[in-house]
Amino acid sequence: MAVKQIVMGLNGDEAVAYAIKQVDPDVVAAYPITPQTIIVERFSEYVANGEVHTEFVAVESEHSALSACVGAAAAGARAFTATAANGLALMWEILYIASSCRLPIVMAIVNRALSGPINIHCDHSDAMGARDSGWIQIFCENSQEAYDSVIQAWRIAEHPDVQLPVMVCLDGFVLSHTLENVMTLPDDVVKKFVGERKFVTVKNHFGKEVPFILDPENPITIGPLDLYDFYFEHKMQQIDAMGKAPKVIEEIGKEYGELSGRTYGLVHPYKLEDAEIAIVGLGSTMGTAEIVVDKLREKGVKAGLLRIRSFRPFPVQQIIENLKDKKVIGVLDRAVSFGAYGGPLFNEIRNIFYDQDIRPLISNYIYGLGGRDMPPQRLMVIFDDLQKIAETGRIEKTVKYIGVRG
Amino acid sequence: MSSEENLPSWREIPIAGVPYKPSTEYKTGDWKVYKPVINYEKCTKCMFCHTYCPDGAIKIREDGFPEPDYDFCKGCGICAEECPVKAIEMVKD
């Protein structure tokens, strides 16, 4: 039985800030950047009003923001930050340090196109640049999911089998600045759900098991010089943790569902069961695509979609299970990998089907760069193309660009 | 540095590079090409070598004579350079 909830009118950024207020982390270190600014503004108001116990660190750059979170998390704090686009790019060095130091930091990424030329609107080039950094990446469809995911993120990050930082990605402006009805849980329910941060133990330099935390009483060194005789082993541990994360993300999503009535998984299928053609993608566009699927269904077209919620870890089995019997799949990428054969999501989706005996035809559609709009009509163009491929049985052009002047 | 085969697997070591042994157990002496050899007939126990060694790898024995610890000596040759009576010779390791 889900608990009683309050509907609030919040945009995506406000929903994230409100969730973080309810979690009341020990440290928030952040630097404002459009379209993430509202998160930092709202949260600093909560701090000024004394509504949270958080130490708010107003840093001079994103590099410092994440560095402060690394120090805080190593010292045992719950640490949160948020950024977008070039802010994330400036954090790049510390992204790898946070994940390899196994620090369960939570960060909201309000997806925005990377400069240049300068652009403040949505695409996924920022998050895709961080896909190999060892962070878990959750992509949200709407502000409700952003609120819900930011709460779940702590449990995923701090899980003893995981111990990895988590990025919660929401589309800039489309979600961050758009008012939505968001169901919010009572403060005490959120507090109880996230609980207190627990610590795994490690062997210290005297061979004694001690908590994994910087503590003068039980000193340890985190992330020291690690050369060819040990670095590879520590990467294996990160690979292993990423491998264990899917199960944890599903468990936490289910537990949250029992509490709130909103269950989350690694992938979210829509009208996919009997579908012959389907699109796959990330983020808010997949919400618009549901309407397009409905319209096609009215016309008798067997269309469906699969939204990937967890891009890292990449839920290979779940994607195969959901898509293996489809005729044609269209993969939507809101990012370019210059010089590559198709977008990043397309590459991974096509890759996992190589081992399958029966493979769907898989086509790539790159769209929405720099906030180029993706209305239902443009999605319809993609579905029309998928239908054509289904009829002819062949893909004439594997990588297509949707909505660009030709 | 020990050979890879004798080192524990990734399943056994702490996460995040946390050292599970004191640094004194991490032998760094195999970097060297030349090692210092002390001629005790010439040595005057002045302890210059002990003082100048940048790695603390020259101990003073109970009898007052210095002795290089080859497990940590990196063969920089500073001791031989500073020895006032030229009692230290750098020999190919």
Image (cartoon, rainbow, N blue to C red):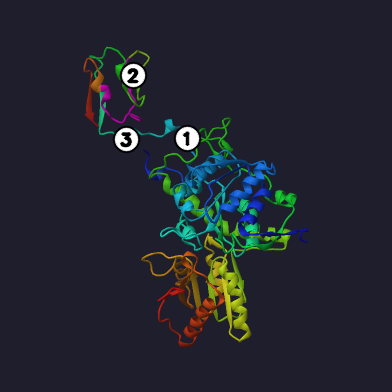
Label 2, label 3: how many angstroms apart (C-alpha)? 22 Å
Dot 2: few (<14), some (14–19), or many (≥20) neighbours within 10 Å? Answer: some
First in sequence, mark 2 or 1: give its number.
1
In the figure, A134 relative to A298: above or below? above
Locate residue A289 relative to residue B46 in the image: left or right.
right
Provide the residue designation for mark 1: B21
Mark 3: which amino acid?
Answer: Asp
Residue under mark 3: which chain is it in? B
Q: Nearer the viewer, residue A162 or A341?
A: A341
Mark 1: give few (<14), some (14-19) or many (20+) Cα within 10 Å: some
Q: Based on the picture, tell me whether residue B68 belongs to the magenta stretch.
A: yes
Q: Position of residue A272 (x, y in %)?
A: 60, 76
User: What secondary structure is marked by label 1?
Assistant: loop
Q: Are marks 3 and 1 on the same chain?
A: yes
Circle 2 residue: B51
The image quadrant that residue B79 belongs to is top left
Q: Residue at x 22, y 28 (%)?
A: B91
- Using the numbered discs, state the Cα–Cα distance from disc 2 to disc 1 in whole angstroms: 27 Å
The stretch in magenta equals B65-79
